[in-house]
Amino acid sequence: MRLTCKPVLGALASTWMLALSAGAAMPPVVDRIPADALWFVAVEDISKFQKNAQTLAQVAGLPSQSLNVDTLLNQMGVTKGFKKDGSIAMIALPGPEWDAAMNAEPGAAEKSEPPVVLLVPTDDYGTFLGNWSKTPGQGIDEVSIQGKANFVKKVEGGYAAIAPKKETLDKFTGAPGGAAKFKDAMGAAGAGVADRSDVLLVANMVALRPLGEKAVAKGLERAKSQMAMMGQAGDGAGSMSGIQWLTGTFLKEAKTAIVGLNMGGSGFGMDTAVTWLPDTMMSKVFAAKGGAAELLAKLPAQPYLFAMAADGSSEGLRAFVKSFIKESGVKDEANSVMAWFDRSDGMSVSLGLSPGGIMSGLFASTSMYVKSKDPAAYIESFKTGLASAPDGGGKYKDAAVDVAGTKVDVWDLKVPADPNNPMAGQMGSMLYGPGGQPGGYAAKTEGGVVMTMGKNSNLMASALKAAKGEENLGSNALIKQVAEKLPGNRMAELWIGSKSILDAVLPFAAMSGMNVQVDVPDNLPPVGAAIGAESGAMRMGMYVPAPVIKIFTELANSMRGEARPPVEGEDGGQPRF
């Protein structure tokens, strides 16, 4: 097996899934990684992979042999001298081949590979080298891995370095001191990711910028060509310019990207941080206080398919969004996105599960809270938008209905149906309910506006209560437990209602003749994702609780007509995460 990025990354990726331990500090091997590395992947303790392989295989329904660390070792010819409780890393280094690739045309750079080194923990270098029937020579030893020449040398501190090219090892010293330099480059946010992760990926975004720019340029050209073929080149020009500005800003201002994977009996998490170059637009965006959790608490405590909250109050974020809108070519008219954005400081939305199921209207139980310093102005901008609907299709009536003692407004929007499409009316009913058209209630409240899609008095009453802090989604115990696994100071968060989605989908699967013999527990937790801010750095996180992984694995097995093998010691209880 020749030591190149793709095969080794693939092999490491398969074993990452075994890391079911609690969070760990920065892997010890990082101290041996040079500060100019393009990127590296490091594992804190390999023994934790093997120890948890069988458990993960049973829970996820995967073949246990596919998660066997010994398989990777055997492929490399390693059976002895390997420190299984040590720390391992694969490192991509700068070099002439990489520099040449950066000067190549788009497309060539993505196919090139930088010099790589696999840094392996060993308790006895001589024994380790004996895997290839070699004895230590005068520095660098040549070995054969799957019939390909590779080179090995001893690194102080208990490591062996392996590379496909001798000149790579000539330059690689493995001298200590890397941990302090990377900790500085990663900042407090990156160090936080490392502390919670079993597998760590760190990328030098400044060094990788040319590759990113080439990849983006190639992708945009491909997208423009596809749009031109579809006759949409003019329509999509604005969005493409916005995307180009967005990706360009990210690449120019990013300093270091850090991705961590962490697992445990409670579930699977991915934690990410991006640090920015000083005094850049992106660093100002993430120098703010995030209020997404407070906005989520403005939503009613109802069963939901999806719920989200986004805080748009910080000056840095508002400047960024306005720049993006401008670069996208959106005109600053009274009913434009810019005008709407100027009148709001954030919003939260719950796509609720209708009591009659999704056939009674996918959006019929949707509620929204808009944070605004001037709720009346926001309502006026909403009215203006309705009035500008084609063929006078939008209507708004002030204080038209009494809901739980509060006069609320009523809005309607007529969406023209295609007379040549007999399914148009049925589709409207599936989306919006029996009326087949969007409409609902709206009311000003302290600090914002409450709206519903669907003229449901009970939903509006619950939404008004939630806006006052009563019976809200933010107090949901399952959401709180998953939120502990996500970044703090959240600027945006997304919640996927696992139980509601299954309750909505499973009846249709059964009617379609699928074998769906699974019991969905009442306390099935949601999947959570969030974007947070920490000391000017971006934090992103996602967490999938173990009960969700388990139920979807059982569902997949049931649909294949397979029974999931029982997990030893499993009592069917709900773990607290």
Image: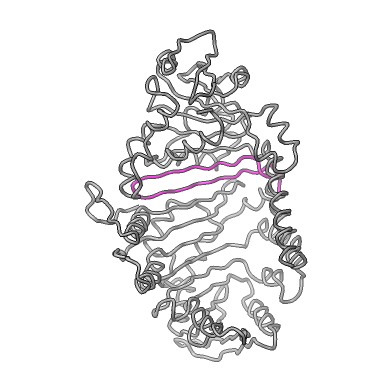
Compared with 250, 228 (above or below) is below
Q: Is residue 364 visible?
A: yes
Q: Is residue 181 left or right of residue 503?
A: right
Compared with 138, 300 (above or below) is below
Give the quarter of the image for residue 291.
bottom right
Quick check: is 87 in the magenta stretch?
no
Give the quarter of the image for residue 555.
bottom left
Q: Where residue 213 appears, x then y in whole percent? A: 71, 45
Q: Where residue 241 appears, x then y in whole percent? A: 75, 58
Give the quarter of the image for residue 84.
top left
* Identity of the residue drawn at 50% across and 20% down: 144
Q: Is residue 40 left or right of residue 328?
A: left
* Identity of the residue drawn at 69% across and 70% down: 337
* Outermost residue, front side: 147
Q: What range of the chain is rendered magenta?
A: 252-281
Q: Where residue 412 appears, x then y in whole percent? A: 59, 86
Compared with 176, 545 (above or below) is below
Compared with 388, 319 (above or below) is above
Q: Is residue 471 visible?
A: no
Quick check: is 272 in the magenta stretch?
yes
Residue placed most toward the observer, 302 or 174 = 174
